[in-house]
């Protein structure tokens, strides 16, 4: 039940205040990578989700973080997407991410995490968030 509520909250957040502030973000057709998962013990969500939209659409990349529950999505700026990878700056925080796609995984680096990259799997949002597993508690 909690998993359903968190998923509903995440989808609601995509239509919430962040969208009103930046105009309607049409995420249909966006490529999505995520490591957001749900704690089996508490049902809390944690992780990061990255939406990459078609060229020419602003913002090109949208990020959504989850800490307890999915937070409202955030616009990025200075987004670059090419055959070698991508880079972007989260507009609200100034955090800079660089990454590359390896198969179905988006490997992201940021100064805050040092040498430990984030690994986000290509996801279909229709399947919901998985239960957290593994050493780092990520799906």
Image (cartoon, helix red, strand yellow):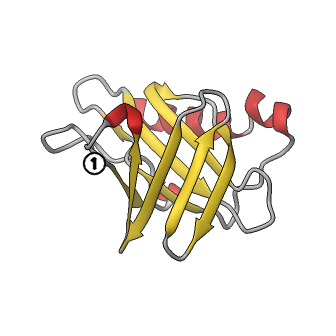
Q: Give the image location of residue 18, x and y in percent.
A: 74, 32
Left or right placement of residue 5 versus residue 26 in this view: left
Q: In the depicted view, which residue is nearer to us: 82 or 31?
A: 82
Left or right placement of residue 17 versus residue 128 in this view: right
Q: Does 100 appear above or below 67?
A: below
Left or right placement of residue 61 versus residue 19 in this view: left
Task: Write down the quadrant of residue 48 in the picture.
Answer: top left
Q: In the depicted view, which residue is nearer to us: 55 or 96?
A: 96
Task: Write down the quadrant of residue 68 in the picture.
Answer: top left
- Residue 1 in sight in this render: no
Q: Give the image location of residue 23, x and y in percent.
A: 87, 41
Q: Residue at x 50, y 34 (%)?
A: 65
Q: Does 71 appear above or below 108?
A: above
Q: Does 112 appear above or below 119?
A: above
Q: Residue at x 45, y 49 (%)?
A: 128
Figure quadrant of the N terminus: top left
- Residue 79 in sight in this render: yes
Q: Residue at x 59, y 49 (%)?
A: 88
Q: Which residue is mark 1?
A: 139
Task: Write down the quadrant of residue 14 in the picture.
Answer: top right
Circle 1: element type: loop
Q: Residues within 10 Å of mark 1 (few under 14, many from 20)?
A: many
């Amino acid at each position: 039940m909690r998993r359903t509520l968190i998923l509903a909250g995440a989808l609601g957040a995509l239509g919430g205040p962040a969208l009103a502030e930046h105009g309607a973000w049409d995420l249909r057709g966006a490529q999505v990578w995520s490591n957001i998962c749900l704690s089996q013990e508490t049902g809390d969500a944690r992780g990061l989700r990255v939406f990459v939209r078609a060229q020419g659409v602003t913002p090109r990349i949208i990020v959504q973080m989850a800490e307890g529950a999915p937070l409202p999505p955030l616009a990025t700026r200075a987004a670059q997407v090419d055959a070698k990878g991508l880079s972007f700056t989260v507009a609200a925080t100034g955090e800079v991410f660089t990454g590359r796609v390896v198969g179905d995984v988006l490997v992201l680096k940021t100064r805050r995490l040092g040498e430990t990259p984030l690994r986000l799997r290509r996801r279909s949002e229709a399947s919901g968030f998985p239960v957290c597993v593994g050493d780092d508690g990520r799906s």
